[in-house]
Amino acid sequence: MLNNIDIAIFVGYVLGLLVLALYISRNDKDHERNTQDYFLASKSLPWWAIGASLIASNISAEQIIGMSGSGYAIGLAIASYEWMAAITLILVGKYMLPIFIKNDIFTMPQYLEQRFDKRVKTTLALFWLSVYIFVNLTAVLWLGGLAIETVAGIDWMYGMIFLAMFSLAYSLYGGLKAVAYTDIIQVVLLIFGGLLLSYLALDAVSDGQGVVAGFTVLATGLPGHFEMILTESNPHYMSLPGISVLVGGLWIMNISYWGFNQYIIQRALAAKSIQEAQKGIAFAAYLKLLMPLIVVLPGIAAVVLHPNLTTPDQAYPSMMALMPTGIKGLVFAALVAAIVSSLASMTNSISTIFTMDIYTQLKPEKSQRHYVFVGRCASFISLVIALLMAEPLLGKFDQAFQYIQEFTGVFTPGIVVIFLTGMFWKKTTSQAALAAALGSALFSFALRMYWPELPFMDRISIVFLLCLAVTVCVSLMGNATTSDQSVDLSHISFGTQRSFNVSAFGVVVILNTLYVTWW
């Protein structure tokens, strides 16, 4: 429970963040705010804001609470989601981002319209809106509400309402610019709080003998929790099926999330230049390498300190009891910071897709001011829907992170096939793209029904290959897309600056070291 000092520190953080967001938003008052200002921060974001905002958008309740819970149940192997994401970010920055920026887009569906047609754009736009509202927003709100109930003793429903109102208060007016710049503070606080909690957890495990001694206690006392590649005999093999983590479905999931996910890639699209965007992505890659130390390690320590938790997702909130007075309020603020940052990012992207890909097609003659107003309304309505649906959808699941991956994995293979073939193979047709989208769901449900013992990550790999085969066959049987401008790569440079290349090499070296050490 929080005492008066913790509450005062937390309230001070909330008020300070709101004041900063309003100050940032006021800088745009010299002209009427248009859609580029609101949805893409006037394309003015520097690399450090992009990198920080990428991580703040990604690391939320489902990551902190969910991955810590998976660390409690599974162990260090769940860190593959974070570590493999680092190398995925490098690939996205080098090979995919130049194409998107060259095509001058606001949204991922907009690119699909340029490359294919309105049918493909609308289909994927509706899919993303559904997933963001009914999976991502609901998960963040639900886990955030549970965390507030555990730490502060406030009912989870009131906690969710507070989170929704807080995120709207600082993001609704200022748009992406307010979100991105306040994310810098969020990330600093998140990393500081997470590292401090890991330090205190390891020190507690070793009975005050220090971090190294605590890590040794965990590694020797819980050897199964430090296996990066799980064997078939492991009870959690279905979630992380051995070597497939390195060569199979996890690649597909990461490419989809970091390359084609609107609320992630939108930060890079708002960069001053392609070089700034790539620097920001490289910065985010290194922060991803650090994340398991912040979110997974406390969960593993909780196995020793709190062995009888009702559900794994209680691990991180329970570990916060280690925090001394005052610091607990700061770390609680860091947790809330991660949650509201993701909520703001998701609602901003929901409003961007709805406004730019759906509403503008229905009402094409409206003013820029009107579209910004519609975007704000979409943000508000999406949060109301998520508040109402959070408990019915997620209330019965022990590990929310695994549930999210399982659900999104149904559609991920088809999305990756559509984008990769659309970007790098001119013969891909609109009919083939639609067939991949439909096939992804049909193949996934069929395999789940008739081959239930197949790990979901392996299922993603198989569905990806099936969707790829369908796309190639349908494309070869049809007429190639006539609009070649968006797929013409002859004028796109995939060359990168030396700083980016050095950063990429460093990520590869660190990843190899980590996996060799904990194989």
Image (tube, grey):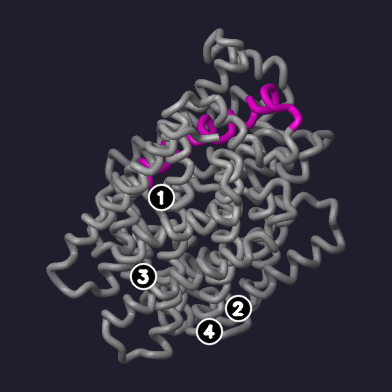
**Residue 286 forms part of the magenta stretch:** yes
- Taking the image as drawn, is residue 117 in sight? yes
The image position of residue 272, as x and y in percent, is: 23, 57
| Quarter of the N terminus within the rendering | top right
What residue do we see at 58% from left, 75% from top? 433
Residue pushed farthest front? 4
Viewer-side label of 3, 4:
3
Report the mark closest to the observer, 2 or 3.
3
Residue at mark 2 to residue at mark 4: CA–CA distance:
8 Å
Residue beneath label 3, please?
A: 106
Read off the residue under disc 4: 119
Dominant secondary structure (helix, strand or loop) of the stretch shown in magenta: helix
For discs 1 and 4, the disc positioned in front in the rendered view:
1
Give me the disc on residue 434. Answer: 2
Label 3 secondary element: loop
The kind of secondary structure element at disc 4 is: helix
Using the numbered discs, state the Cα–Cα distance from disc 3 to disc 4 in whole angstroms: 18 Å
User: Where residue 205 sits in the image (x, y, percent)?
Assistant: 62, 17
